Image (cartoon, helix red, strand yellow):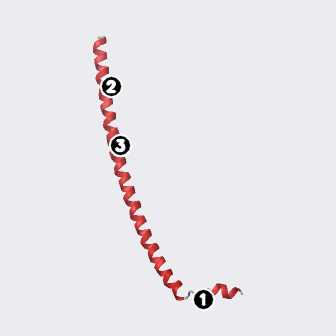
Amino acid sequence: MIAKQQNEMFALKKKLEANLNERLKVRETEHNKLLKRYQNVKREIEKQHNIERNKFDKSMQGYISKDKNARPDTATQRM
């Protein structure tokens, strides 16, 4: 009787351990998918940000090169 219970307990422990290992694998897989997705979104946002910054820098370079020696209107109005 005791041997039968011990065998049943051993079988249940083994089944629980296998179930836990399977859930851990699934969890790790889902984590890796989310991490890759996050990295891709972050990379895309950074790329768009760099494009916008480059556009802004180019537009500012055109503005600065036109009037290198001129003072801004606000500086002349305050005097």
Instruction: Classify residue 20 by image quadrant.
Output: top left
Give, as a three-letter code, the residue at label 3.
Arg
Residue occupying image coordinates x 55% and y 88%: 67
Mark nearer the N terminus (1 vs 2): 2
Q: Establish if 49 lies above or below 60.
A: above
In the visual, does 8 lie left or right of 48?
A: left
Q: Establish if 65 lies above or below 8.
A: below
- Dot 1 lies on which element? loop
Q: Are circles 1 and 3 on residues that touch, CB within 8 Å? A: no
- The residue that mark 3 highlights is 27
Q: Are circles 1 and 2 on residues that touch, CB within 8 Å? A: no
Mark nearer the N terminus (2 vs 3): 2
Q: Considering depth in this image, is 79 or 37 the residue closer to the camera? A: 79
**Quadrant the C terminus occupies:** bottom right
Binning the other alpha carbons within 10 Å of mark 1 as few (below 14), some (14 to 19) or many (20 upward) gives few
The numbered mark at residue 13 is 2
The numbered mark at residue 70 is 1
Q: Are circles 2 and 3 on residues that touch, CB within 8 Å? A: no
Q: Position of residue 65 (x, y in %)?
A: 51, 85
Residue occupying image coordinates x 32% and y 25%: 13
Q: Position of residue 70 (x, y in %)?
A: 60, 88
Q: Position of residue 4 (x, y in %)?
A: 27, 14
Binning the other alpha carbons within 10 Å of mark 2 as few (below 14), some (14 to 19) or many (20 upward) gives few
